Image (spheres, rainbow, N blue to C red):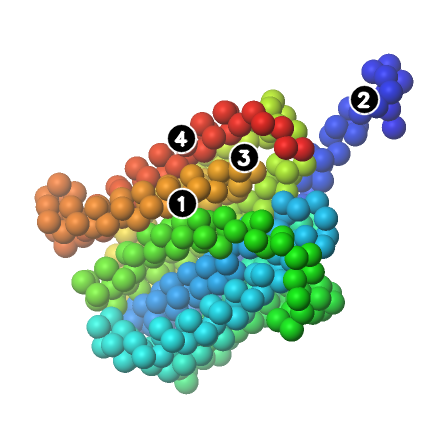
Amino acid sequence: MPHPVLGQGVPCPSERKQPRQDMIRRMATLMGGSVAGQLVSVLAAFALTRLYSPEAFAHLEMFALVTGIGAVLGTGKFEQALMLPKQEGAARSLLWAGQRSVGYAAVLTAIIAWPTAAWVSREWALEQWSMVALFLPVFVAFAAHTRLLEYWHHRQANAGPVALANGGAPFAAESGKLAGSVMLPLSGLVWGSGLGLITRWAIMRRGLKEVCQSAGWRRSEPEPGTSKAHRDYPTWVLAGSAMNRLAQWLHVLLLGIALGPVLLGMLGLARRTVMQPLSILAASAAPVLFQSATEMADGAPLRRLFWKALATFAALSFMVWLVVMAAPDNTTAWLFGDQWFGVMEVVRLLVPWFALNFMTAGLGSMFHRVHRPRWITALDALHLLAVGTGWWLGTLHPEWFGGGEWGALVGIVWAKCGYYLVNVTVLIFAVMTHGNADR
């Protein structure tokens, strides 16, 4: 209702607060699901690290690499555009294009993974990889399609199914890992994670049968021309995401082949205990921030929303860094068993990267809000270049990074931290200079 003093058509204070309250409510719902899921994962980790060896965690790390890249690229990046159209028909066209991309991604995964399985198994000392590779196309398809469904729920401002998936899928995954520890000592972690991916998809898919079928492979595009109008996403944004994901996971490929599966397994545990919870929180918050930003007018309202989000992510990142740096040296051995004593040193080394990655992942959707998808591509190219340069310098001059065999890893961490600071700086500039009203 119009405010009686401010006049006709001017929203009253309670109406102005409504979008913010809705955003907080959705974010709290998503956070609740994520926290519940992470609690299950953390509790299970106490047992899993005693049941499985570092080599088993190395298998899981490589599986996470493939399915993680496949999930993000397999959609053709159309999920990023799902919230932009105001009309339902246009959004279904983007879902239609995304579902076709998922099918292509599964086929491409088979073409790459199957012929190279024996080579990967040999070079990375992953004994069970050949068997895992047979099922990779299926897991990539489930992971990518889940991402599309998640963004569709966010478009509808429906946080419930996403929160339920974030909480329920880890329960299925960790149960599968525990059950497989006796019969599958090297690959049980992988099959449990695969069960989690399928469970997450099933929860997301509930209630969306009609939507998915209306945008199915045998149907024509619901609103012709929409996918073509968003061609920056399967081109520029997809290219940027490919470079970004490769940069995110390059350490697994390089360090795994250079330093062996034990260190790779330690990196995997560090990622699981610190980076993964942060990434899930960022993935839960980012679509809510994006959806709220699309409802916000350009200028001061959008900038205020951005600064509040930046302050929140920065504070959380600093808290994580502080907790890790203050933890005793024997923390990981006490939590996960004596064979994981050295992981604490790895976690301390990696935590600046994990914390800054959390910030950029949570805020990155603002680039789409201010219509700068090509800036993302340029930044992702810089990310890949930075990681490659850090690896090269760390390998060539390990003394620059403290010496020892970890010089390359330290070089990668320094390069990543420098890139993330540049990313945040460019994002601030993009938001502050965005002045063209599009709403």
Q: Amino acid at mark 4?
A: Thr
Q: Earlier in the sequence, mark 3 or mark 2?
A: 2
- Can residue 366 be seen by looking at this rendering? no
Q: CA distance from mark 3 to mark 2?
A: 26 Å
Q: Earlier in the sequence, mark 1 or mark 2?
A: 2
Q: Earlier in the sequence, mark 4 or mark 1?
A: 1
Q: Amino acid at mark 1?
A: Thr
For disc 4, the neighbor class at 10 Å (few under 14, some 14 to 19, many from 20) is: few
Q: CA distance from mark 1 to mark 2?
A: 40 Å
Q: Earlier in the sequence, mark 3 or mark 4?
A: 3
For disc 2, the neighbor class at 10 Å (few under 14, some 14 to 19, many from 20) is: some
Foreground residue among 347 and 426: 426
Label 3 residue SS: loop
Residue 336 location, quadrant: bottom left
Residue 172 in the image: state x and y as whole percent: 56, 70
- Determine which of the numbered discs, if any, sits on residue 320 in the image: none
Q: Residue at x 23, y 59 (%)?
A: 255
Query: What residue is disc 2 on?
Result: 10
Would you place residue 278 above or below residue 427 in this image? below
Query: What residue is disc 3 on?
Result: 370
- Determine which of the numbered discs, if any, sits on residue 377 in the image: 1
Q: Nearer the viewer, mark 3 or mark 4?
A: 3
Residue 401 in the image: state x and y as whole percent: 16, 43
